[in-house]
Image (cartoon, rainbow, N blue to C red):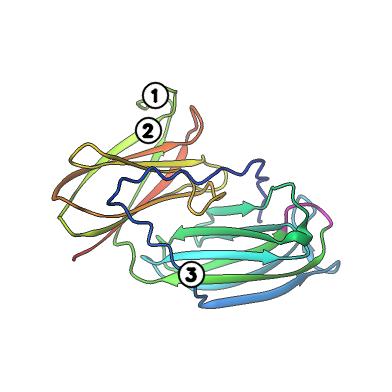
Amino acid sequence: MVIKFKIVRNIFLLLAFSSFATSFAQELSYDKVFDGELVERDDTLETGEYSDTYTMRLKKGQDVTFVMTSSQIKTYLIVVAPDGKQYDVGDGTEDEASLGSETSLTIPISKNGKYEITATSYNVGELGSYSVGVAIKKGVYSDFSTGMLVQGDTQFENGEYFDTTEFNFEEGERVSIAILSDADGFDTYLLVETPDGQTLTNDDFPEGNSNTSRIEFVATQSGTYVVMISSYDVEEIGNYILAVGRKKP
């Protein structure tokens, strides 16, 4: 059963990239679009919101962005992976839905299989039309690992737990690093230290999506890059997936 995890705050996208880091942001081109409408005969979530569910088969290594838009409801989007892990994001702003509502969720795909996409509303009783676009980038990630932030892990000065791992990248490589935590996990925060001591950080990717943090950059020098997986708030714990992709120049 899909359970809705209410998002109570929107976090600004924090990008402390050095001059050589690149976001590679581009206008999205959707590979699939689901147009629908929330009506009173729809199924409801356990918390009472009307909802529609769609399915798609996705492949390991893809980087997939789901975008729900509506001018009539405040959007809320839920994606459930084949292993039952749930990822969600909602529009918790105070703006009226008539001004336009959009939520975006980006997931590094670590398992082949069928993914369930549930379109719903932020508030109970909302009715109206919406669109869900799915943009797929193929072959972005090649290495996946799992881990867990637990009590007793090393902590930053402010109290956030973190795990550390290292990768060797060559000069000129285009690198993508992402961490993903499910909805009842923690609000992810990703840091990368370069061989010359610079630090790259990201909180939410895209903005407001607390499930995923992602950093993309072109390595300006060969050497060891230190990756730190942490949380936005202090003493948060939970499981995560670390995805890494690299492309030769």
Q: Quadrant of residue 97?
A: bottom right
First of labels 3, 2 by sequence position: 3
**Whether label 3 touches label 2, CB < 8 Å:** no
Q: Residue 67, how many percent across, how many down?
A: 58, 65
Disc 1 marks a residue whose amino acid type is Gly
Q: For the stretch drawn in magenta, what is the main secondary structure?
A: loop
Chain part drawn in magenta: 121-125
Q: Residue 145, how many percent across, how many down?
A: 33, 50
Disc 3: which residue: 27
Q: Is residue 212 above or below residue 36?
A: above
In whole angstroms, how far apart are the C-alphas of marks 1 and 2? 10 Å
User: Is 154 on the left-hand or right-hand side of 232?
Assistant: left
Q: Is residue 230 above or below residue 28?
A: above
Whether the magenta-drawn stretch holds residue 144 is answered as no
Residue at 47% x, 65% y is 64
Disc 1: which residue: 152
